[in-house]
Image (cartoon, rainbow, N blue to C red):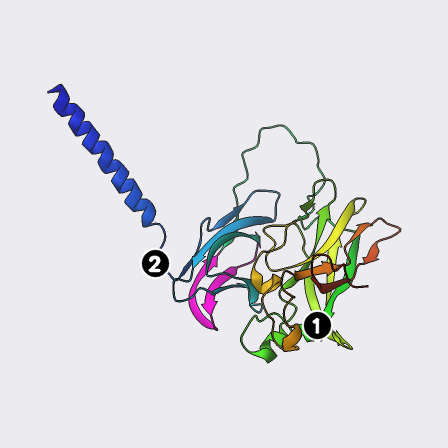
Amino acid sequence: MKKTSQSLLLAFNLLLLVCASASAQQQLPPAPFIIADNNPVVIPPGETSGTVTLEWDGGAKHPYAEVWVRVDQTDETFVVEQGRGSRNATVELGKHYVFKLSDANVLLASVSVTVRRGNVPPSSGVSPRPTPAPMNSPDYEPIGAVNGKIRWKKAYGVVPVTGNVQEALENRCISFYVAALDPRTNQPLRSDHSQMFKADDEGDYHVCRYTLKLPSNQQWRIVAQMGGDGLLPDPDPNPLFLTRAWIGGDPAQSKPPAGGMRAFIGSKYVTLDRRNSRATVDFELYYAVPGSGTPK
């Protein structure tokens, strides 16, 4: 009888493992799909932004699927070209997000992400000490900003965010951003990355202009990047930004030489205060090739 009971117990445990494994496999839908793991995103009291984790798979037929996002009623913004992957995205309270997975302008899947305020914890009866408003709070007022531009040679072309050259030219700034890193930790200021708000031309160069708000009385290193910001301070490794050929330029100069990659010069350290509330930091994209130095 004892051996029979042990056999039944072992069989039951094996059944639980099989069921758990099958359940885990069923958590992801068949490709193509895009899902948000922690949706809705709950923002703790006193904060205004949070993080949603995206997972997607375009399937075998869509190895170059692209992830785009629409915030409220704004135009869609390119996130990354990667047939399968996952990444964190910052979302803000009061805004609605739709993340889309597409290939050659064909919608494969989408997910709607909502953001809501978490419950306020019950009062302990003790008045807390007043604390300064966090940097990502609407009550925080940075007293300064960094302005500038990112430029690159027209011969290099533009990021092929779509297969249409004219559309890619019109949206040539959506793949760029500027961020601030804390020199002490090399970690980014997550509360406010820049917005590339104006695209224009300067002779033989494409230009994207930006504004980046900064808190005062602290030193920051200002850097330019492309693609997603989830790996900062490291660049997005997507070859679309680093090594792959771009469109709309000189075919002979549309991608870096063998062994090279796209990079930026112009990074600077800035400290803003009441007397110096503005700073200008300009960047230039170039082809970084080991042993060749940087352009003058």
| Helix, strand or loop at mark 1 | strand
Q: On the image, which quarter does residue 61 sit in?
A: bottom left
Cα–Cα span, label 2 and label 1: 39 Å
Front one among 27 and 111: 27
Q: Residue at x 63, y 28 (%)?
A: 126
Quickly name the residue at label 2.
30
Horizontal and vertical percent position of residue 53: 49, 50
Q: Are the residues tagged 2 and 1 within 8 Å (C-beta)?
A: no
Q: On the image, which quarter does residue 217 sit in?
A: top right
Q: Residue at x 64, y 71 (%)?
A: 172
Magenta region, main secondary structure: strand
Task: Please check the rendered image and state whether residue 267 is part of the magenta-colored stretch, yes or no.
Answer: no
Range covered by the magenta-colored residues: 94-113
**Amino acid of disc 2:** Pro
Residue 152 in the image: above or below residue 16: below
Q: Is residue 215 visible?
A: no
Residue 197 in the image: above or below residue 218: below
